[in-house]
Image (cartoon, grey):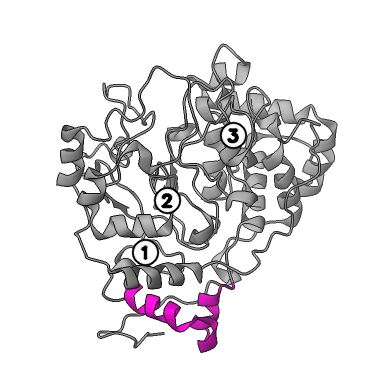
Amino acid sequence: MCFAGFAGAQELPKPLSDDAFLQFDPAQARLGQMLFYDPILSGNRNISCSTCHSGAFGSGDGVALSFGEGGIGLGPARIQGTAKVRQSRNAPPLWNLSAIEVRALFHDGRVEVVNGTYQTPAGGRLPDGLTSLLAVQALFPLIARTEMAGDPEENDIALAAFDNAPKAWRLIAARVAEIEGYQSMFDAAYGTDDVDIARIANALAAYIDADFRAQNTPFDRFLSGDEAALSEQQKRGVALFYGDAGCSGCHSGPLFSDQQYYNIGLPTFGPGMTRRFDPVARDVGRMAVSGDRADAYKFRTPFLRNVANTAPYGHNGAYKTLEGIIRHHGDPERGLRSYTRQSVDLPEIDSAVDDFAFVSDPRIQSQIIDGLSIQPKLISSEDLKALVDFLKSLSPSQPKTPFGRPSSVPSGLNMD
């Protein structure tokens, strides 16, 4: 379908249909629902996947950089507790991650499929039996120190995860296997009550697929021929998005991402994703995965479906609103140079480390600006509003959530 609302009409994507997704067993999704909300998967039994990926906050947590393991509470109300640092990156939304065309996950794409082979930080130590890229991705927050594992001196899972990921995963599976309520669920899902980490990860992927699909949006209905599905303002936004604003150059296809990596000039703040040999607490993005200096400060193009409900925006949640992140795209150098700690809401932290030490550092700023992947493009206030209104049309009126949040989990642990 072409949209003739601007000169040089471009091809629009097809509506996102069920055929675009992997197909999972409902019994596995039911098991995954319980595991997703159960703190039993965490080293100290105090945090679950749902803590940072809540349906109440658009499958994130509504915070730029939140507290993971050791924090107390949910969403913007979560406080430090015993956590030592904020998370290094914004909790990525979960929408449509089971789509067949998804090739890379995490902001830096460190879990990806290349020529049919999974490439991950675990190298060749992945467990056998994983059935999707989404299942592969689900393994890593479980053993990340500040996300779910905790410190090595606190529990055996974190101690193992420090240098032996397979052992840590086996310990997690053994812990789940001890809970009677899970045995029958594994039998229903897999025809065996034998619990292993691959079956846990596959079940988590099945649940995420079931409860975090953004389909049948007003824009999908418009693509199917329903002209009344979008307002005139939203149609103007479509014309800009696929035309003069140039958004579709990167945000292409039915998921609105080319899954490539770009430096859009976002500021550097937070504890960083520091490599062992890097003396500066910063986040160099894709470069830490590829080892290529040309990838410095580049991050994967985010998927945009349901984007209006997944604030804040950017790999570190630098912008609170869609207006803010779009305006930054219009003039990334100006956005970077004018950025201050007052630009973002972050939970208070008791730490000797200054998370904003490099926000205005001229050397870091110059490195980012010299490697910018996008050029300035002035966006008027009227165009900005039209683009925002169009992006709102990418959210379904009522997302399918066949499972949702359970009232309790088999471990009996507190889900809050």
- Residue 136 place in picture, x, y as percent: 53, 43
* Near-viewer residue (367 or 35): 367
Q: Is residue 373 left or right of residue 240?
A: left
Q: Is residue 45 left or right of residue 327?
A: right
Residue ID for mark 2: 313
Q: Earlier in the sequence, mark 2 or mark 3?
A: 3
The magenta-colored residue range is 216-242
Residue 228: within the magenta? yes
Question: Most extreme residue toward the top, as rendered?
Answer: 153
Residue ID for mark 1: 251
Q: Is residue 94 above or below residue 362?
A: below
Q: Amino acid at mark 2?
A: Tyr
Label ID, residue 41: none
Q: Amino acid at mark 1?
A: His
Per the image, label 2 sits on a secondary structure element best described as: loop
SS majority, magenta: helix
Residue at image point 27% right, 25% down: 280
Residue 366 appearing in the image: yes
Q: Which is more foreground, mark 2 or mark 3? A: 3
CA–CA distance in space, label 1 to label 3: 32 Å
Residue ID for mark 3: 78
Q: State which quarter of the image contains the C terminus.
A: top right
Q: Earlier in the sequence, mark 1 or mark 2?
A: 1
Q: Which is more foreground, mark 1 or mark 3? A: 3
- Residue 195 place in picture, x, y as percent: 72, 35
Residue 274: within the magenta? no
Q: Amino acid at mark 3?
A: Arg
Per the image, label 3 sits on a secondary structure element best described as: loop
